[in-house]
Amino acid sequence: MTAAVRVRSRRFGEPNPRVPHVVMAAGMLYFLVPLLWVLIAATKSQPDLLSSPALWFGRGFALFDNIGQLFREDDGIYGRWLVNTALYSGASAVGATVLAAFAGYGLARFSFWGKRFFETALLGMIMVPATALVLPTYLILSRLGIVNTVWAVILPSLLSPFGAYLVRVYVTESVPVELIDAARVDRASELRIFWQIVVPMIRPAIVTVFLFTLVATWNNYFLPLVMLSDADLYPLTVGLTTWFNTAQQEAGTRVLFNLVVTGALLAIVPLVIAFVLLQRFWRGGVGAGALK
């Protein structure tokens, strides 16, 4: 049978099996092209960055020179920004994951007065944009006297309504009530049940909450922009934006554009490492869900 006959034999309205592949390929290019541009641009000097084609290399390979200059600029403040970002993201991710695990487990397996109200409020909090909460959060933290400190970034990031809801759903679907009741009959404490029975069974959900919070805090720009005024406390997002604005105001006379791009490239590396190291837990969760 020829190709023309096969095409004519397809029923009217039947989807073309190639369409999903084309759509996925287009989506992949949409996300990969900016990363490719950053990777290529980080290898250029500032003159090459401003004159050469966007998706092609310059006349020389200046990546290592850019990295060296990056950590020397402004007395090495980029290194401080990197440490600040790791501190904000790490503390927020760990704290938010622990709180979400406790909250989700409590909503899934305990009965108490007002439970339905808290579940409804949790869903409502998920729908509120985080940027809408920055101003009231600033007013509260200002009264507490902790604006322009590390706590002004960490404390608001500890709350993860989506994480708590995700853990609640995962506990409901993956942790049998009979298993918890059997542990209680054996006189295991609630804390021991949670850490030794529940946590290993909901590990994929915990890793998901951790990674989501890590990435959200690592990429957060508006919250630290509002909360912090000391450049030594800036994360990478605010610090690199400050450099970029300075380079624009000085019309490119100061060598900063290539440093901003190189700094953005280095900022991606820790997130890639985190995903590579923790992806096996996601695979385990997907496999367990398939077996069910």
Image (spheres, rainbow, N blue to C red):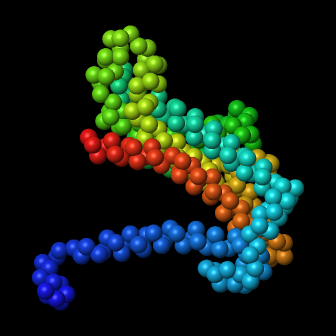
Identify the residue at horizontal 72%, vertical 36% (top origin).
146
Q: Can residue 118 be seen at all in this image of the molecule?
A: no
Q: Quadrant of the C terminus?
A: top left
Q: Residue furthest right?
A: 75
Residue 193 image offset from top left, x and y in percent: 42, 20
Using residue 5 as the reference point, say whether residue 95 is left or right of it: right
Identify the residue at horizontal 54%, vertical 37% (top origin).
96
Residue 164 image offset from top left, x and y in percent: 44, 36
Q: Quadrant of residue 17?
A: bottom left
- Count numbered badges in the picture: 0
Pick the residue in front: 221 or 29: 29
Q: Can residue 184 be seen at all in this image of the molecule?
A: yes
Residue 2 image offset from top left, x and y in percent: 16, 89
* Residue 3, placed above or below residue 232: below
Using residue 255 as the reference point, say whether residue 30 is left or right of it: left
* Residue 149, placed above or below residue 198: below
Pick the residue in front: 160 or 20: 20
Residue 259 image offset from top left, x and y in percent: 76, 66
Using residue 284 as the reference point, say whether residue 100 is left or right of it: right
Identify the residue at horizontal 47%, vertical 28% (top origin).
102
Pick the residue in front: 20 or 218: 20
Identify the residue at horizontal 61%, vertical 73% (top origin).
37
Q: Quadrant of residue 95?
A: top right
Q: Quadrant of the N terminus?
A: bottom left
Q: Quadrant of residue 287?
A: top left
